[in-house]
Amino acid sequence: MSKLSFGYEALDRTGTLNVGEVPPVPDSERVGLKKKDIAADHPTWCPGCGDFSVLAIYFKLIEQRKIWHENITTVAGIGCSSRFPYFVQGHGVHFIHGRALPYASGVSLSRPDLHVFAFGGDGDAFSIGGNHFTHTARKNIRMTYLVMDNWVYGLTKKQTSPTSPLGFKSKTDAWGSFDRPINPMKQAIAAGATFVARTTHTNPKHLLEMMDAAMDHKGFSFIQCLSECVEFYEGAFDASNPRKGGSFETVPEDHDVTDEIAAYKLADEGFPGKFGIYYKNDRPSKNEQEEALGEKMRAKVQGLEDWQILQKNFDRMK
Ligand SMILES: Cc1ncc(C[n+]2csc(CCOP(=O)(O)OP(=O)(O)O)c2C)c(N)n1
Ligand code: SF4
Ligand SMILES: [Mg+2]
């Protein structure tokens, strides 16, 4: 299949359709994009890094959910894990350290037709980006935020992160960390995230299941994904990996995902804990509420474009 004779492939990659080419095939006839269509740069991660699995599963999800190039929206902060958007052929942003969520919020609120995926690490999410995490969760802005938690700062070569366990020896805590680690699951529930799930890079099937369920959620969906840093924290998650003698247990079938207290209890279990959806509720998202407000305003001033309504409001403030 040559690129020139099949307009839609050219359209997907360049966003333009050249004169003389056949028009794009309708959405219903498109097939899911394969890895070869979505992979961009070769990942620069160390061989064996857990982040590779997350990328592979993101590709699978894109294929399975038939997300076309023009709708792929991948946002990240700074860190090894945050290099993610470079490796995906689609719209992507490698933004400021800790600031992936404000950027993703803007995209989500202004483009209701897209599902935004934000990716990052434990440092990016809970250290420098901790405040943004709290506010994006409480505002329930529609997106999926997957944190590749490796319990360390990988990119900057081994500093203590907010999820590093007590006693962890690093370049910032040569004698072992004294600081009580945060628990991302409790943090997400307490902040008001409406979908909170836990998975691991060593179980790709489960990871795909969680990402798929998160994408169906209509508010802020958070996934903590254990992702081993083989360079600076090798073996951190062995106790959760049956291939390393550990145990992988899913959330019990009778767990009520709408019960916040039950979710905290699950989150309070010692490592390796349980994997799956801990918490989920249907509180309206900011997106839905802003959309409803917009409709109400438009109904009051029929015939005006959105920018004209805004202009009128500004004029009134003068
Ligand atoms: C404002 C700012 N402060 C500090 C840094 C240095 N820095 C880059 S990545 C990083 C931590 C990354 O850790 P994490 O988010 O856990 O990602 P990982 O590399 O482990 O995937 C830090 C402190 C920076 N780039 N910008
Ligand atoms: S330093 Fe760690 S987190 Fe970064 S690419 Fe290497 S293994 Fe992955
Ligand atoms: Mg990290």
Image (cartoon, rainbow, N blue to C red):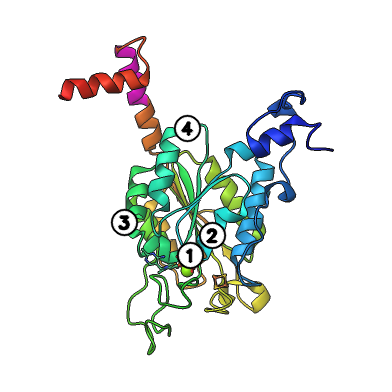
Instruction: Give the amino acid type for the residue marked by disc 4 in the picture.
Output: Pro
Q: Is residue 120 above or below residue 158?
A: above
* Residue at the image point whose x is 62% and y is 51% from the top: 88
Callout 1–callout 2 Cβ contact below 8 Å: yes
Left or right side of 107 for 35: right
Side of 309 where 199 appears, left or right: right
| Coordinates of residue 210 in the picture (x, y in percent) | 57, 52
The residue that label 3 is drawn on is 131
Crowding at mark 4 (Cα within 10 Å: few <14, some 14-19, many 20+): few
- What is the spatial separation of the Cα atoms under label 2 and label 4, in whole angstroms? 25 Å
Mark 2 belongs to which amino acid?
Arg
Asked if residue 66 can be seen in this view, the reply is no
Q: Is mark 1 within 8 Å of ligand 1?
A: yes
Alpha-carbon span between mark 2 and mark 3? 21 Å
Ligand 1 resides in the quarter of the picture at: bottom left
Pointer 2: what residue?
83
Q: Which numbered disc covers residue 79?
A: 1
Identify which amino acid the numbered label 3 is placed on: Asn
Q: Residue at x 83, y 38 (%)?
A: 2
Magenta span covers which residues? 292-300
Q: Is residue 7 above or below residue 277?
A: above
